[in-house]
Image: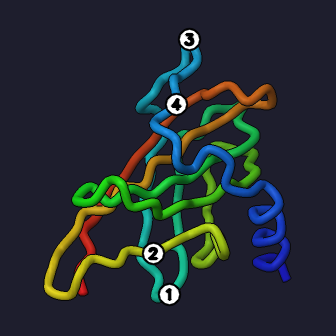
Amino acid sequence: MQKLAAAAVITAFGLAGCNQSRPQVSPGADPSQMTVAFNWCSNASPSFRIGNIPPATMSLRFKMVDRDVPGWIHGGGEVPIRGPVATVPCGAFAGGYNGPVPPVGQIHTYEWTVTAYDRSGAVLALGAASKTFHR
């Protein structure tokens, strides 16, 4: 039930800004403050653990880019958040996420960027993590 509620909230927030370049961080914010870790999930968006989230954060926006084919839009999602640590379950970005799909035999590097926003929509912090994927 909790996963269904989280998925509904994520879907409600939508994918606004997922195909934009990295946002500018608000003055006084630390752009490398957040820690990001993720694990691939079969046929679903990854699970995430985000740490060092600034206290005024109201939402986190996730965006995935294939570093080998940066023009391919993989999407992501947005989740509401309160607290210094967030855990996002596998499959939370249903409908707004295109998983890693390198051609058979190739290895691609995928990077997730996570952006923390305050109540006014100002960027408080950024975090990123990347991993390879092959088929």
Picture quarter containing residue 79? bottom right
Q: Earlier in the sequence, mark 1 or mark 2?
A: 1
Q: CA distance from mark 3 to mark 4?
A: 12 Å
Give the image's coloring scheme.
rainbow
User: Badge 3 is on which residue?
Assistant: 27
Q: Is residue 118 left or right of residue 19?
A: right
Label 1 with label 3: CB-CB less than 8 Å: no
Label 1 with label 2: CB-CB less than 8 Å: yes
User: Badge 1 is on which residue?
Assistant: 43
- Indicate whether 35 appears above or below 15: above
User: Badge 4 is on which residue?
Assistant: 23
The label nearer to you, 2 versus 3, is: 2
Q: CA distance from mark 1 to mark 4?
A: 29 Å
Q: Residues within 10 Å of mark 4 (few under 14, many from 20)?
A: few
Amino acid type of the residue tagged 3 in the rendering: Pro
- Indicate whether 69 appears above or below 132: above
Amino acid type of the residue tagged 4 in the rendering: Pro
Can you give x and y, in whole percent of width and height, for residue 32 in the image?
A: 41, 32
Q: Residue drawn at (61%, 62%), measured in percent from left and top?
A: 87
Picture quarter containing residue 122? top right
